[in-house]
């Protein structure tokens, strides 16, 4: 089979969708929505093998009716095996090239998504005092605002800051300043 991943806006879910195309056809069909691209590509199992989430219920929520596959690396072949009975086989070189290329392609991003990626890069792996761990950032909750989430067990702490929606670099600069302030607390 041939794998293509196309990243498109998903207005219904206020994010984007990594459409899984197999041999040119939408593999997830009408019952599932592709994952938000950063969510899909953060899974190391795409390239290393293992259980991998590739689709979410058409309601847009993960955990509702997820579409998972077991990625199996077998020499020069990558197989996707699904508990639903699907079996796909890809040429390993072509498969890896597609995953790596799409993981590094940010052409689908609007300024909000670019700002989120930059802010996530600033806070990635940050743990605040008291073991509060960085989860995510969003520029889509309020115009001109970035919301950053930290969690501790089942608690969540949200921090907001302003940025210029026309210039994602302003979000990155403000995130670096906030990180210095929060880490030094």
Image (tube, rainbow, N blue to C red):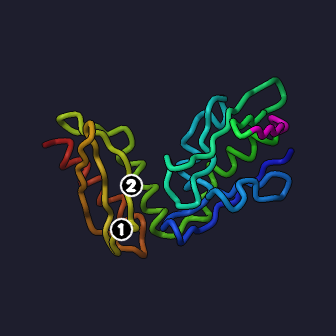
According to the image, label 2 marks what residue?
119
Q: Nearer the viewer, residue 163 or 59?
A: 59
Position of 42 relative to 161 (above/below)? above
The N terminus lies in quadrant: top right
Q: Nearer the viewer, residue 104 or 149?
A: 149
Name the side, left or right, on which 94 lies relative to 156: right
Q: Position of residue 48 (x, y in %)?
A: 65, 29
Q: Which numbered tag is attached to residue 53? A: none
Q: Nearer the viewer, mark 1 or mark 2?
A: 1
State which region is magenta. 85-93
According to the image, label 1 marks what residue?
141
Residue beneath the point at 76% across and 38% down: 85
Q: Position of residue 28 (x, y in %)?
A: 70, 54
Residue beneath the point at 73% across and 28% down: 72
Position of 25 relative to 66 (above/below)? below
Q: Position of residue 160 (x, y in %)?
A: 25, 61
Residue beneath the point at 23% across and 39% down: 128
Q: Are marks 1 and 2 in contact (CB under 8 Å)?
A: no
Name the side, left or right, on which 99 lies relative to 95: left
Label 1 crowd (10 A; few <14 / some 14-19 / many >=20): few
Q: In the picture, residue 177 is in which quadrant?
A: bottom left
């Amino acid at each position: 089979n041939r794998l293509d991943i196309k990243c498109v806006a998903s207005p219904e879910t206020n994010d984007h969708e990594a459409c899984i195309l197999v041999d040119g056809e939408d593999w997830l069909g009408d019952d599932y929505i592709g994952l938000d691209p950063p969510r899909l590509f953060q899974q190391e199992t795409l390239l290393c093998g293992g259980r991998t989430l590739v689709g979410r219920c058409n309601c847009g929520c993960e955990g509702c009716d997820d579409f998972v596959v077991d990625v199996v690396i077998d020499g020069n072949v990558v197989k996707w095996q699904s508990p639903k009975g699907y079996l796909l086989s890809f040429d390993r070189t072509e498969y890896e090239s597609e995953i790596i290329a799409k993981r590094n392609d940010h052409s689908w991003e609007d300024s909000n998504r670019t700002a989120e990626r930059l802010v996530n890069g600033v806070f990635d792996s940050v743990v605040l005092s008291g073991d509060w761990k960085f989860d995510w950032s969003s520029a889509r909750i309020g115009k001109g605002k970035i919301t950053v989430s930290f969690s501790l067990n089942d608690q969540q702490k949200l921090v907001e800051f302003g940025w210029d929606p026309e210039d994602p670099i302003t979000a990155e600069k403000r995130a670096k300043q906030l990180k210095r302030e929060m880490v030094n607390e």
